[in-house]
């Protein structure tokens, strides 16, 4: 569950009780990100943290070992069909490098503007999970689109 809302800590328990295995919150929406990640883990869910395109990866350095997942938004949150923001690749590369250097266990995820081409460059930068919406739903053959992204 990607909680793209203000005061996400108010909703953690409800989503965990509803069965969420991973709960991700925007660092920009959390006053105390460390405490929020701990609250997620206390429910038994895995804890994810989300970065908007303009937020530097360095803002996460204090919680990288707490995170099970880091989601880099590759578009500005709010609506589907936007184009991939290629500048976000720098954050992804840094996060992948830090994960390797420090033996962190988080998965790297991207969301926004994912298609056959952007999936490839995101994977090359170190991404583990791709979120694709508009590309799949607007494709004439969604199964082919999924296969193409997996290549």
Image (spheres, rainbow, N blue to C red):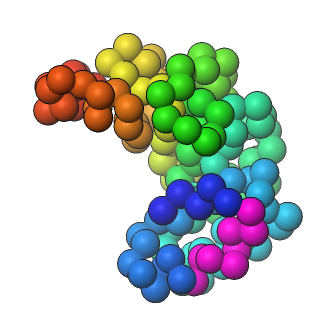
The count of marks equals: 0
Left or right: 92 in relation to 81: right
> Is residue 2 or residue 136 the one in the foreground?
136
Q: Position of residue 73 (x, y in %)?
A: 59, 37
Can residue 119 be seen?
Answer: no
Residue 137, above or below 1: above
Left or right: 77 in relation to 126: right
Is residue 11 on the magenta stretch? yes
Can residue 88 be seen?
Answer: yes
Residue found farthest to the right:
31
Prevailing secondary structure class for the magenta stretch in the rendered image = helix
Is residue 40 on the magenta stretch? no
> Is residue 75 or residue 70 the one in the foreground?
75
Q: Position of residue 36 (x, y in %)?
A: 71, 71
Q: Position of residue 99 (x, y in %)?
A: 58, 41
Task: Tell me what residue is drawn at x 41 percent, y 70 percent.
Answer: 21
Q: Position of residue 92 (x, y in %)?
A: 59, 30
Task: Tell me what residue is drawn at x 14 percent, y 26 percent.
Answer: 141
Residue range (magenta): 6-13
């Amino acid at each position: 569950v990607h909680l793209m809302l203000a005061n996400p800590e108010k909703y953690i328990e409800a989503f965990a009780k509803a069965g969420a295995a991973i709960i991700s919150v925007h660092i920009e929406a959390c006053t105390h990100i460390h405490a929020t990640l701990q609250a997620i883990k206390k429910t038994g869910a895995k804890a994810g943290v989300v970065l908007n395109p303009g937020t530097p990866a360095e803002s996460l350095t204090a919680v990288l070992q707490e995170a099970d997942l880091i989601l880099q938004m590759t578009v500005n949150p709010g609506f589907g069909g936007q184009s991939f923001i290629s500048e976000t690749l720098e954050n992804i590369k840094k996060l992948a490098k830090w994960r390797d250097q420090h033996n962190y266990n988080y998965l790297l995820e991207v969301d926004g503007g994912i298609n056959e081409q952007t999936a490839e460059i995101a994977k090359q930068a170190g991404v583990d999970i791709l979120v694709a919406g508009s590309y799949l739903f607007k494709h004439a053959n969604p199964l082919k689109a999924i296969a193409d992204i997996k290549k």
